[in-house]
Image (cartoon, rainbow, N blue to C red):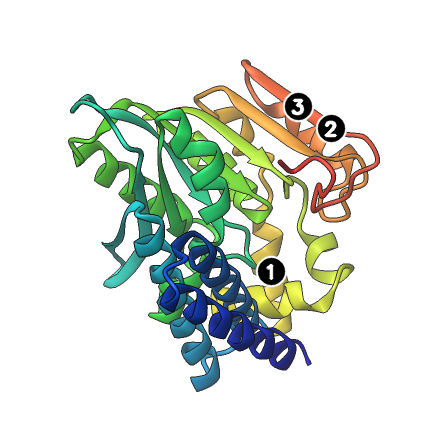
Amino acid sequence: MMLKAFVTQAAEVERKARFAEGEGYDAAAAGLYERAAMLYGRGAYAIFKDDPLKFEYHRKMVETYDKVISLSKLKAERVGLQMEGKTLYGMLYLPPTKNDEPVPVIVLLPGMDMVKEQWTRMIQEQVLPLGIAAFALDGPGQGESLLHGLKVSVTNYDDAGSAVVDYLVARPEIDSQRISLFGFSFGSHWAVRLAAIEPRLKATAGVEGCFGPKDNMFNVQQPNYRSNYMYMSGVFDDDEFDRMTAELSLDAVAPKVQCPFLMAQGEFDELSPAKETLALYEKLPEPKELWLFEDEFHPLGGVAG
């Protein structure tokens, strides 16, 4: 039902986008193509295995998203980095500049049910206008990286993060002394790990945090979380999967964080209860800060902006 609902609506929105583009209404067309891309992406997410339909709807997401880039005249480029004999996929967005001075950058880590293309609204409205670049990553087990065979392990997101920082340091447009990191949902878990191993990060934030033990996420909450992470990791045996996810604790990692860290989540977050978040917060070194939003749950819908 999810697949049909998302892609049927996606095709209709894409039809409207093509009409608007044909009439010369580029801004309207870009907004509609963005909506179509997000819908195709959600359709692809509904399939938790390598499948021709998953590849096709991911291809449609990329195709419609590239229309957003061209019609919005974004300075954006797709990036492929080598890792474990596979390709790590990302996108670099550069702000309009009046001179050749290097700019700061935010590395964006999606959640485990997200892809790098989903950051477009935040990047356009909240990052680029500040004169800050953005690098959106499909890490191991995510988006294009997953579809090309790069699975996630307990530790290999660390290597992915360092590969991204290596790439950004080598870009002349980027100020290598001002690289920050923003992890969203499960991306906040990887953000803690990267802040602990990557000394070149100057600040890190974990939003809609997944900071606590993962038994609640994979054995209590909606079954899609477990099904999706099995696909992301390539571990489909239940006992082996439980052994692997038991190793995802951040207790020993948090004290090693090397830069200022911001936590932000809802008071009633079902994936990382406040008690668990507070326990990990106590393990972080200073400087640190925690924003706990009253009466919000995981999506932070009332305050996300």
> Dot 3 lies on which element?
strand
**In the depicted structure, whether residue 254 falls above or below residue 54:** above
| Residues at marks 2 and 1, CA–CA distance in whole angstroms | 31 Å
Instruction: Residue 26: tell me if it is visible.
Output: yes
Query: Residue 185: percent from the left, percent from the top?
Result: 60, 46
Q: CA distance from mark 3 to mark 2?
A: 6 Å
1 vs 3, front mark: 3
* Residue 151 seen in the current view: no
Looking at the rendered structure, the kind of residue marked 2 is Leu
Q: Nearer the viewer, mark 2 or mark 1?
A: 2
Q: Measure the C-alpha gap from mark 1 to mark 3.
A: 30 Å
Q: Nearer the viewer, residue 217 or 121?
A: 121
- Per the rendering, the mark at residue 243 is 1
Q: Amino acid type of disc 1?
A: Arg
Residue 7 quadrant? bottom right
Quarter of the image for residue 113 reads bottom right
Q: Amino acid at mark 3?
A: Leu
Q: Earlier in the sequence, mark 2 or mark 1?
A: 1
Do labels 3 and 2 touch, CB within 8 Å? Answer: yes
Residue on which disc 2 sits = 292
Task: Give residue 146's quadrant in the image.
Answer: bottom left
